[in-house]
Image: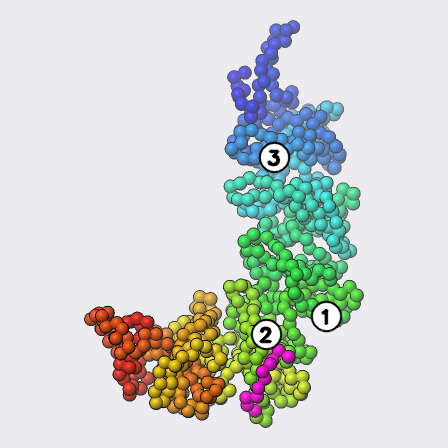
Amino acid sequence: AKKYPTKRKSFQVLYGISQDPDTGDYILVLIWTSGNEKIDDFIQERQLNINDYNDIVLEWIPYNQFSEIKETGKNGFITVYSAIWKNGPLYKTDNWRNYYIRNSNKRVALKCLDNSQEFIDYLINEAKKYPTKYNTFQVLYGLSQDPNTRNYILVLIWASGNEKIDEFIREKQLNINYYDDIMPEWISYNQFNEIKEIGKNDFITVYSAVWKDGPLCKMTKWSNYTRDSNKEVVLKLYNIQGSIDFLINEAKKYSTKYKSFQVLYGMSQNPNTGNYILVQKNSTWISKNKIINDFIQERQLKINDNNYEDIVFEWIPYNQFDEIKKMNMQSKNYIRDSNKKVTLKCLYNSNESINSLINEAKKYPTNHKSFQVLYGISQNQHTGDYILVQNNNIWISGNEKIDDFIQERQLKINDDDYDDIMLEWIPYNQFNEIKETGKNDLITVYSAIWKDGPLYYNYQEYKYKRNSNKKVALKCLHNSQESIDSLINEAKKYPTKYKAFQVLYGISQNPDTGDYILVLIWTSGNEKIDDFIQEMQSKINDDDDDIIVFEWIPYNQFNNIKKIGEGGFATVYSANWKNGTLKYDVDRKIYNRDPNRVIALKSLHNSQNITNKFLNEVKEYSINKKSNVLNIYGISQNLNTKEYVMVLQYAKDGNFNQWIKENYEYFIWENKLSALLNIINGIKEIHQKSLVHRDFHTGNILFLSNIDNF
């Protein structure tokens, strides 16, 4: 009796001692066993080796514990039954609990070995093949015996009964490496309720359903498997009872990663039709065309689990254009972005050429932050025409060559390069305040306000936004409607990057004359100035963020203009520049603006007609932020006086004379030497340009904000 443990949580429990009054024999009163010493010793050995909550509690199970026994397969001397085990297997939820509980009314598989009562060693060797851990596929709960035939039974976790399917599921489970990987399993069909058909074609029917128990999952690396009960799933039913290899090959396409879009939870079988079922994670509609379905599935399975920007491409029923998928980075689950505005691009007679439809769809990128994103394919119920469902409201010109050129440029945009220009077709009614600024025999140039404004990528919000009420130049090409190729060749001359000087935003058309229009970034309108600005910008090196982007700045960009000084040749003002200077972010490789920057405006008297002298004076200033010569940001023009204006760095603390009056007590020897060194460096820069400062005095030595910054 001392051999038996003293705790109820043990499995070889000694309840007590008794005695037969007739024979006088003593009796050990034990938990129910098989009555066969070899089997009981095997079960006891397995139970005594339990060390972990995840170890299987192998036990002897009386046959009367089973109900709803149904034969599911037979092979030689083995017959397999499904059954309900009333008490169910013992388990612990974690290592800290000191007691076991039962999972009652558990569906199990009964593997009945014919004549096994005559071969106990064989029975035990067969039982030893099964693992001892719960997180495996082939779980042996215990042994039993049919009281009628005396055949022994291996009581197993419920499986399909098909060797190939069971082996496939077992292989998938053994390949699990991470705690959040899905545990694929065989799922009894009676686990599903609220089954509703959502799509059908010749060989697949798709249903939505609720899986009562739900999939196995772990919350952390160290936690136990639990079930996500009452889980909404998709049942993809294949009309292929006889083709197990096809079913398994189809199942192999799906991921076991929890955060993937197309996840396979497991397999099942409709007991009425015999059709096999793939149980999946997300609701996916299907079209009635196999080629389209294969294309959509191929795109979905290519989604990178670690790239939250990938588009979930799908078949979208015609009445479902308000639910487009996007990834939520925090939850790592897919959610719907409801009531989403989309563009429907209807391809006439596309039902007659599916390959052309798919080739057109293949042109679009799969990244969510791309401009031209294809959400999916749909079909007009009335006409049969297929529809490409796109992300942006894209205007089209009505001319195939122009539309193809614009689409080609848009699709070439690099998703990671925020400096690419978004070329687009711009309706003429988008422009107001249209004023002629120049004309020759072939071209008329206008200034205008573009109401919506150009698109740019806002990397903080991860989406494209518009710079509304943007002043632009309209370059109207006379009689261009007669030569579309010439128009496109002219458009091709412009660069594709925003950092360029001559930016082409898009193409438009005057509805009265029919002339096509190139919509350009607004410039000075003066060829000499524009060439000069382009020359200055050509010196920019993307790897050097100390170089200033010299530019033409519309005068209406300035407010809070205050006069601060006047000389014989110029008047100087302080002002706020609304947009501010362009700054290059070397890490992100994009330009940002420093808004509401205080600058100085140096307005040259009688400079309405630009001269080389004016431009040479501009060159005397520096476009290097680290220079000891005052920085220049660009050129502008006063709209009232027509005088040209240099936009300069603002010296906050004034000139040397002003600074010394306010700060003479801080002008110690150390600061004097620092100031002298900076003055020497500034003079050195001027001399290196083969120039001489002909008006050098303390009034022209400016302090920006401190002793070392002037």
Q: Which residue is mark 3?
A: 130
Check contact, mark 2 vs mark 1: CB within 8 A.
no
* Residue 476 relative to residue 108: left or right: left
At label 1, which amino acid type do we have?
Leu
Residue 308 within the segment the image draws in magenta = no
Q: Which residue is mark 2?
A: 452
**Mark 2 to mark 3: distance in Å?**
69 Å
Q: Secondary structure at mark 2?
A: loop
- 33 in relation to 286, above or below: above
The quadrant of the rendering that contains the N terminus is top right
Q: Residue at x 58, y 21 (%)?
A: 13
Q: Which residue is mark 1?
A: 347
Q: Residue at x 40, y 79 (%)?
A: 562
Whether residue 544 appears in this view of the structure is: no
At label 2, which amino acid type do we have?
Asp
Check contact, mark 1 vs mark 3: CB within 8 A.
no
Q: Secondary structure at mark 3?
A: loop
Give the residues in magenta.
429-439
Question: Whole-percent x and y of residue 431?
Answer: 60, 80
Q: Which mark is residue 382?
A: none
**Mark 1 to mark 3: distance in Å?**
58 Å
